[in-house]
């Protein structure tokens, strides 16, 4: 007779309870940590690392047979730690899982997790655009399709959990991890992030929301620096994307590394239990960011030893320690023996872990350790992946400025210069395998076929390439050579910006924060030298963050922005520059105005904007939502259906007629903002409620109808409760956060309503 915990016909709660009743304390604790077995041995000493403090926080040497004798909760990055062929990696997974099943009394497999931010971080896997490009696409359906492909790839590899998406809302673009975020607006971040969750989990992979909560608000944009923000900013700006992704069904959450108002999140039950679980209703697993529990002792100084760190984290609500066992092994048992933590806390965590394993089928009788790839070997970077990567790259490229220089005319003689022009890996983000792990292996091929920008443009134009300068450093001679090449050309295409990396190995990425927002190194000097030639300069900002271009912008013939667009980024960029593709991306984060150290988002209250009481103007050079096209839709007369005003518990409809008078396909993003002139607290002057994208064939006319619920107007009042209140507001139907097409006054009527986690979070849009 099959034991109840092995029987898929039994309810999950029954199965988990039956299994836990049979387990010893030591076997339970073994489910609460991972093992990182194949850490890259070439990445030691002073070499770059793939996790913060990897050397000094690495777990003690593992006796594998002793470790798995009690079971094991997770396997860490079998594919994403060192180069391994996919089939060999699949055999490694099968072998390790077989040993785990054979080693423990109950034969419970581990959950295998991998990074999957711009594709699964495995050698030879597809490399998609980074999340900032997802935001620039304003296309959640395409992001969902991408995530579904990532999930299917992970399932083929025998992986069950993905450490994505990042839902941190940008607060300071100097922060190195801006490239990993979706944008500076919580509605955009939440809409696109929820789509990623739906896509990934449609393949049976657990999505992990990062980093709960407040990570992106660190002081001065410094990674892991303290966060000093109030509860209202958390509730109204940083939390909504997590709420939207949880509503989409996300099954795991990862903690923020930093302290918030002095309390490290990894030790904060107010955030990880009272907020996340009690108020938001989350019942999945909370996993620690790598070494975050040990950091309570070593970095934060809120624990005397690892036993106290373990007790603090467990009480706060962290169920699983990643990447390996630092604190949740013998230190946790020591804390238990000392009475510093109750065994019910262990049972609470293990119940969540085993319930997740049950949902994944890992407790089913007959579960097999061999990944699907072993039964049907085939390339991971298949035609569907390339198609998705190309489409997403195309739709995320933003035309910032165009003085009739684009599209490039046939026969134009080009000079293509800059550090990003002829370097394929400059198209990738810091969590792509080549920039995350491959940097430790300089002789390793990229693993996927990738063109550089020069390669892609050479298919259409006669061109000369000149480096100009590397991303940092460089010589006078190289800058002069690039200027000479530009002087002899009809048009100069300057590809400037960032190289992604980790902890100082790049100009963008985790641990690669910017001291100011000038182009890195000598790149601004190079740009000035190119402009001085008199040749029209088309600037391509290929980067992980926006940069301050105010000193050059009026002299540029055109400017384009693309945020690490992935393996198909170069041909997508060439198609935009030549006009084969009509650019339709919109900025998910504004480009800063003059003042190289004055980052500011568009979500600002009146005194956070330009005023007479400060000499600093924080206005954005290119605002959130901005993006030009070679041909765009004509917008008709916008109307609002609200016969009796907008009830505080009701809906209104905004109707936008759209028409394509051109001879090519157009795609437009209709952005709807709210302006609330009088509230209990100082609110942003405008904030996004909806931003649907509409595609139109040549000559086509359609009507966009957007339904907005009053809950979208809610904010946190003085009493700490979220409220929808009566009063006069404006709905702004706009092409960007500053380019308003129509302002629609509407009275909100009815009593004050207090709303919570069950409120309406999204608009509804249909095209008729």
Image (cartoon, rainbow, N blue to C red):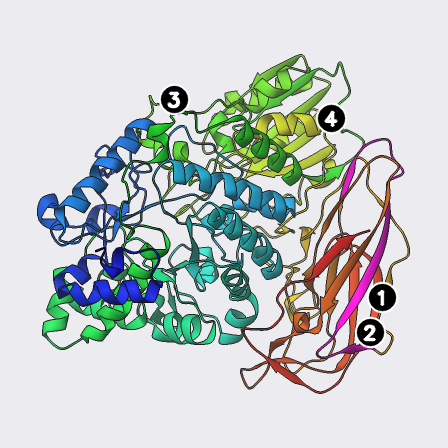
**Viewer-proximal residue among 203 and 320:** 203
Could you classify mark 2 by the number of other residues whose Cα lies within 10 Å: few (under 14), some (14-19), or many (20 or more)? some
Which secondary structure lies at badge 3? loop
Whether residue 506 sits left or right of residue 397 in the image: it is left
Whether residue 153 sits left or right of residue 41 in the image: it is right
> Label for residue 580?
4
> Label for residue 445?
3
Q: Earlier in the sequence, mark 2 or mark 4?
A: 4
Circle 2 is placed at which residue position? 746
Could you classify mark 3 by the number of other residues whose Cα lies within 10 Å: few (under 14), some (14-19), or many (20 or more)? few
The spot of residue 461 in percent (x, y) is 68, 15
- Rendered residue at 19%/54% (across/down): 325
Mark 2 and mark 1: Cα distance apart in space: 9 Å
Which callout, 4 or 1, points to the residue nearer the camera?
1
Which secondary structure lies at badge 1? strand
Give the vertical position of 44 relative to 166 (above or below): above
Which secondary structure lies at badge 4? loop
Mark 1 and mark 3: Cα distance apart in space: 56 Å
Residue 357 figure quarter = bottom left
Mark 2–mark 1 CB contact (< 8 Å): yes
- Rendered residue at 45%/42% (across/down): 151
């Amino acid at each position: 007779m099959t034991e109840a915990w092995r029987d898929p016909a039994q309810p999950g709660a029954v199965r988990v309870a039956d299994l836990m009743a049979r387990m010893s304390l030591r076997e339970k604790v073994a489910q609460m940590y991972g093992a990182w077995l194949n850490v890259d041995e070439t990445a030691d000493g002073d070499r770059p690392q793939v996790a913060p403090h990897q050397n000094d926080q690495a777990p003690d040497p593992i006796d594998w047979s002793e470790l798995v004798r009690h079971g094991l909760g997770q396997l860490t990055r079998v594919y994403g730690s060192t180069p391994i062929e996919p089939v060999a990696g699949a055999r490694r997974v099968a072998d390790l899982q077989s040993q785990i099943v054979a080693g423990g009394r109950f034969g419970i497999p581990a959950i295998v997790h991998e990074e999957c931010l711009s594709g699964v971080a495995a050698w030879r896997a597809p490399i998609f655009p980074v999340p900032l490009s997802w935001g620039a696409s304003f296309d959640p359906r395409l992001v969902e399709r991408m995530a579904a492909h990532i999930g299917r790839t992970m399932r083929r590899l025998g992986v069950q959990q993905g450490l994505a998406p990042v839902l941190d809302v940008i607060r300071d673009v100097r922060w190195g991890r801006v490239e990993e975020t979706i944008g500076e607006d919580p509605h955009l971040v939440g809409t696109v992030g929820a789509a990623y969750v739906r896509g990934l989990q449609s393949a049976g992979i657990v999505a992990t929301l990062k980093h709960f909560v407040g990570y992106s608000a660190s002081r001065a944009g410094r990674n892991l620096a303290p966060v000093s923000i109030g509860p209202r900013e958390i509730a109204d700006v940083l939390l909504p994307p997590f709420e939207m992704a949880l509503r989409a069904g996300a099954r795991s959450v990862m903690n923020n590394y930093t302290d918030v108002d002095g309390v490290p999140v990894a030790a904060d039950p107010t955030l990880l239990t009272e907020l996340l679980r009690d108020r938001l209703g989350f019942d999945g697993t909370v996993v620690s960011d790598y070494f975050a529990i040990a950091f309570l002792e070593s970095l934060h100084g809120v624990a005397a030893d690892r036993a106290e760190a373990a007790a603090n984290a467990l009480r706060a609500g962290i169920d699983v320690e990643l990447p390996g066992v630092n604190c949740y092994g013998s230190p946790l048992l020591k804390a238990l023996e000392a009475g510093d933590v109750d065994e019910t806390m262990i049972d609470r965590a293990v119940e969540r872990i085993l319930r997740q394993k049950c949902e994944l089928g890992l407790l089913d009788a007959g579960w097999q350790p061999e990944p699907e790839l072993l039964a049907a070997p085939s390339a991971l970077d298949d035609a569907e992946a390339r198609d998705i990567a190309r489409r997403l790259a195309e739709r995320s490229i933003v035309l910032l400025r165009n003085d009739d220089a684009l599209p490039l005319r046939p026969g134009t003689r080009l000079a293509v210069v800059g550090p990003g022009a002829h370097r394929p890996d400059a198209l990738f983000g810091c969590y792509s395998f080549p920039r995350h792990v491959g940097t430790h292996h300089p002789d390793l091929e990229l693993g996927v076929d990738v063109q550089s920008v020069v390669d892609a443009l050479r298919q259409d134009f006669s061109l000369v390439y000149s480096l100009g300068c590397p991303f940092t450093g460089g010589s006078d001679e190289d800058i002069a050579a690039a200027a000479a090449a530009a002087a002899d050309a009809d048009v100069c295409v300057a590809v400037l910006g960032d190289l992604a990396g980790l902890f100082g190995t790049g100009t963008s990425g985790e641990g690669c924060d910017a001291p100011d927002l000038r182009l890195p190194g000598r790149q601004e000097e190079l740009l000035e030298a190119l402009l001085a030639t008199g040749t029209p300069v088309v600037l391509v900002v290929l980067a992980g963050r926006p940069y301050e271009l105010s000193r050059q912008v009026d002299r540029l013939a055109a400017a384009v922005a693309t945020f690490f667009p992935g393996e198909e980024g170069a041909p997508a960029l060439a198609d935009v520059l030549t006009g084969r593709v009509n650019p339709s991306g919109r900025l998910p984060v504004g480009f800063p105005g003059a003042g190289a150290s004055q980052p500011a988002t568009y979500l600002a209250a009146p005194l956070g904007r330009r005023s007479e009481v400060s000499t600093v103007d924080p206005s954005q050079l290119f605002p959130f939502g901005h993006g030009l096209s070679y041909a765009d839709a004509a917008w008709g007369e916008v109307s609002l259906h609200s016969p009796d005003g907008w009830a505080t518990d009701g809906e209104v409809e905004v109707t936008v007629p759209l028409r394509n008078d051109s001879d090519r396909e157009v795609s437009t993003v209709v952005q709807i903002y709210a302006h609330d002139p009088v509230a209990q607290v100082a609110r942003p002057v405008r904030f996004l409620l909806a931003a649907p994208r509409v595609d139109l064939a040549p000559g086509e006319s359609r009507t966009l109808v957007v339904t907005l619920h009053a809950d979208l107007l809610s904010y946190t009042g003085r009493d700490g409760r979220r409220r929808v209140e009566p009063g006069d507001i404006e709905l702004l139907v706009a092409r960007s956060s500053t380019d308003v097409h129509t302002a629609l006054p509407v009275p909100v009527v009815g009593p004050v309503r207090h709303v919570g986690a069950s409120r309406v979070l999204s608009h509804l849009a249909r095209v008729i």
